[in-house]
Structure formats: C-alpha cells, structure tokens
Amino acid sequence: MKSCELFAEAKTLMPGGVSSPVRAIKPYPFYTARAGGSHLTTVDGRNLIDCCMAYGPLILGHAHPHIRSAIENRLADGWLYGTPSPLEPEFAQLITGDHPGMEMVRFVSSGSEATMAAIRLARGFTGKNDIVKIEGGFHGAHDAVLVQAGSGATTMGVPDSAGVLKDLVAHTRQVPYNDAEALETLLATNHDIAALIIEPVLGNIGPVLPDENYLSEIREITKTYGVLLILDEVITGYRLGIGGAQVMFGLRPDLTTLGKIIGGGLPIGAFGGRREIMELVSPAGPVYQAGTFSGNPLSLTAGIATLRWLHDHRSLYLKLAEKTRTIEESIGDYGTGSFVRLGSIFKYFFRASPPKNYREVKECDTEAFGKFWNRMMDREIFLPPSQFETNFLSAAHTEQDCTTIAQAYAQCR
Ligand SMILES: *Cc1c(COP(=O)(O)O)cnc(C)c1O
C-alpha cells in the first residue's frame, strides 16, 4: 500500500492516524518501509536523507551494524526477565562514570517517565510543592510539564492540554530561558519551590543556545535558594558529547534525566543524581517508582553497545560538529533567516537573528518554514516537519549527504 492509503486507513483506527502528534505531516505523512545509515526508504519507493533521526536517539545512524549485532546476540538469551540482570550494574557504571551529577541511577522506559519521576523525587526530597520550568521547554507528555511545552504542543497551537488539572498545573511556574534574573526574582518570592527543570539547550523549540554563563548562574541561584536543579539531558546526553551538557558547560546538577541516545534506538529513560537524593527512591526510600519494562535487557544491551562505541570513537563528535559547520558555511549568505548549530544539532530559523527564548522562537515565520520544508522534501531531504524541532545529524551522514543537504538549504530557504 502507498503512504496515502495507509494514512487513510490509519486515520479511521488511530487518533489523527499517528502514534505521536508531530508525525502527522500534512496532507499525509510518508510511511517508512526500512531505514539504514542516513537514509529512510518509504513504502512509496523514495529514498530520503534523514535529518530527523527519530528526533534524536540515532546518533550512530539507522540500523548501525554494531548495535544490530549486539541486539541480535542478546535475543537468544531472552528479552525480558522481570528480575535484575548483570546488564544493569554494567550500564549504571557507564552512566554514572560519564556524568558528574549522577552518583546513582534508575532505569525507566522513556524520557517522559524519567522527568516525571525526577520531579516527584525532588518534591519528596525537599518537601516542597512547586516546580519551575522554562517557557518552551519540553520534558515529555505528562501533566506537570505540559505547559508551553514546545515541539508538538507549540506546532499544534495547543500550549496546554485538555484533561490536565488546573490545580496541578498551578504548581508549575515558568520563567523565560536565558533570563537568570527572572528565575532569581521568582525564587526570592516563592519559597515553596522544589526544583527547576531545564533543558540545558532548548532542543524541542530549537536549538536555542544558552548565553554565556546562563547555566552556571542558574546553578548558583538554585543552590542559594535550596532548589534542586534537574537537568533534562534527554536530548543533550551523549549528543553534545560524552557527559552531555553537564560536562560541556561544567555544571553539577542535583538530578539528571536521560533518554533517547542511551537506548541505542530502543525505548529507554533514566534519572539519577546525588546519592542522598536517589536513596529516597523506592525500595531504598519512600518515593515510589516502578516499571514492568524498566532496565529491560534489550534496551540496555543496545544502550551499552552505543555508549561503548561512543567511548571508543570519541572523535566522531568533532567530525559531527565539522559536518554541521560545513553545512552552515556552504549555505553562505543567510538571506532572511539565521542558522544555529551546536555539535550535531542545527537548524535554520526563519527569523533574522537566532532566538534566545520561547517568545523569540514564536516570531519565526512558520509559513515560510512550511514552504521550505516541502521544497527540501522535493529534493529527498527529510527535516523534522516543524519550525520548532531541532535537526539532527548522525555519524552515518556522509560528506556527500552533507553537501547535498547544504546545496538544498541554499536553494530552498
Ligand atoms: C524527548 C524528550 C523527552 C521525552 O522523552 P520520551 O522518551 O519521548 O518520553 C523529555 N525531555 C526532553 C528534553 C526530550 O527531548
């Protein structure tokens, strides 16, 4: 069946025809038959250069042979035990070893689960009720953080969600990104704040990059007011480098959330932090958290294989940064927009200067982006279908891919 036929059927069976809102490309999404390296092959026979990479997890590219053989080798031993397995301490060693802010870790099955548990844990530890998030920051699709949550929510023009209790969201405060003063003012007047949860680089409306010193300032401010800093590294973890943003920017958060890359393409999440906080997680402590698929051997196997590969091929981060730089430079004169990149994440904003916060991101010309996105598709390049999503490159993108992408950008913007 062709994509349009599959979508017509899916729409009658699944809300909006999709399993996650951002995938509902108009008039209908393409359906992927298979993927390898930097390319997606659609059921309609198109072969697309993928700059979305499943929204972040696939830093090594699709169907990487090393990860694939690790998964295949694991299958013979079964793929779900419901008991501890030796993979857990092995993986925990790797992750705590890479992150200065993670002395202990709990594995879960998605990034949303990780942030949900981290927020509960912060409340349990501090005994306080409110949390602060950043306007336009995205931390998954659970109630406490579905306020001006970027990405799908922003694109759909639904900054909030039906079905979320007002009473609950009343405990979610917001401050603009890159505004340490706004945070300080809030913390000085509200003494019931358990935690600030923040993406170090706004990835779900961006990339929006931190001003110099912004992250170290918010670390100081949260420390001063006894507010926990939850660094949501679901995108940035192993994306900006080994140890993510906390290593890149020299931060020591109280809690960290991970997901995406650490599952090597299989579902995963993790949260971790200071030992005295993590010791409150059940069964060690009173903050309940549990999951049937938590720490499942297949996700951990793919994750371990990915992290070991990244450790053994550290230079790939430099090469990735080199590739996005080449793309930026090949585009040349920007015309009306602005190009933002950090390592392997990049985006062309339809706005004269790079946005610094959510308000500025919303000034982007989404109509121009829509036309641009279609022109890129005509050239067989798949970008995330929203002005509010980051583009991702992988180690599988070749120089030829990057040249093709750069030429297309120059022609289409
Ligand atoms: C993707 C993402 C999440 C949610 O992760 P899921 O695995 O989709 O639940 C949370 N935080 C950030 C920063 C993300 O990019």
Image (spheres, helix red, strand yellow):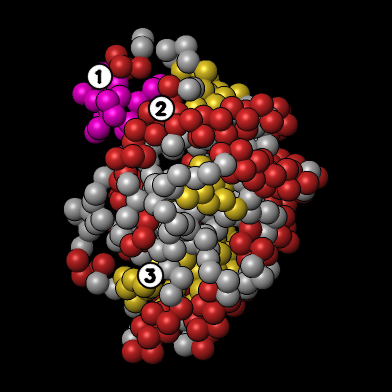
The verdict on residue 10 being magenta is yes
What residue is rendered at 36% in x and 10% in y? 1
Do labels 3 and 2 touch, CB within 8 Å? no
Left or right: residue 238 compared with residue 171: right
What residue is rendered at 38% in x and 70% in y? 176
Image position, residue 144 (x, y; %) = 32, 63
Residue indicated by mark 1: 8
Upstream in sequence: badge 1 or badge 2: 1
Left or right: residue 250 compared with residue 142: right
Nearer the observer, disc 1 or disc 3? 3
Q: Secondary structure beneath disc 1?
A: helix
Which residue is nearer to you in this view: 21 or 342?
A: 342
What residue type is disc 3 on? Pro
Whether residue 299 is visible? no
What residue is rendered at 41% in x and 27% in y? 375
Residue indicated by mark 2: 375
What residue is rendered at 66% in x and 26% in y? 400
Residue indicated by mark 3: 176
The verdict on residue 158 being magenta is no
Q: Mark 1 to mark 2: distance in Å?
A: 24 Å
Tell me if residue 294 comes above or below residue 285 in the rendering: above
Q: Mark 1 to mark 3: distance in Å?
A: 40 Å
| Magenta stretch in the rendered image | 7-33
